[in-house]
Image (cartoon, rainbow, N blue to C red):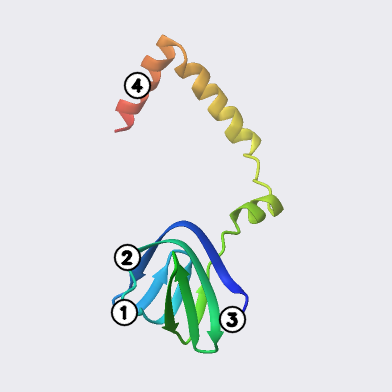
Amino acid sequence: MSDPLVELRGRVECRREACGALGLIRVSFAGPAPSGLPDTLDGVLVQRLSAAECSISSAGNRWVVRAASVHVHRDVGDAFYAAVPPRRAPLGKRLMWRIVLAVAGRPLGRRMLTRLRRSLQ
């Protein structure tokens, strides 16, 4: 056996696409689903057996998938947002919202904003 491609903890949903391809959440196989594979698995280990075969193991069961390719999707959101800091809102927009919220915080200001909104409709 080779090193694991991916190990998924917890409950994993198995999706069978209309084209016959098998998709586990975060792992996609370009090949048909093996027979006897349930709709959900707990604690999945996916390993590459050969260039065209992978093994899916869960709770003592094992299925072999013949797939032309396997795609492992990894969440890179945290690393992306750590590398690309958020853009600060322009000064004009910040001032405009500060004024609108201050006006809306008073009864007279709410009535003025309500009238303005109705006149624009």
At a point 40% along the width and 16% down the height, the residue shown is 110
At a point 33% along the width and 32% down the height, the residue shown is 120
**Front residue (pair 15, 54):** 54
**Residue 95 in the image: above or below residue 5:** above
Query: Distance between the Cα atoms at labels 1 and 3?
Result: 22 Å
Q: Quadrant of residue 74?
A: bottom right
Mark whose residue sits in front, 3 or 4: 3
Q: Label 1 is placed on what type of residue? A: Ser
Give yes or no for contact between labels 1 and 2 (Cβ–Cβ under 8 Å).
no
118 relative to 1 in the view: left or right: left
Mark whose residue sits in front, 4 or 1: 1
Quadrant including the C terminus = top left
* x and y percentages locating residue 91 in the rendered image: 65, 34
Q: Name the residue tied to disc 1.
A: 35
Q: Label 4 is placed on what type of residue? A: Thr
* x and y percentages locating residue 14 in the rendered image: 37, 67
**Front residue (pair 9, 102):** 9
**Front residue (pair 121, 107):** 107
**Residue 61 in the image: above or below residue 119:** below
Could you tell me which secondary element the residue under label 1 belongs to?
Answer: loop
At a point 55% along the width and 88% down the height, the residue shown is 50
Q: Name the residue tied to disc 3.
A: 1
Q: Quadrant of residue 114?
A: top left
Give yes or no for contact between labels 1 and 3 (Cβ–Cβ under 8 Å).
no
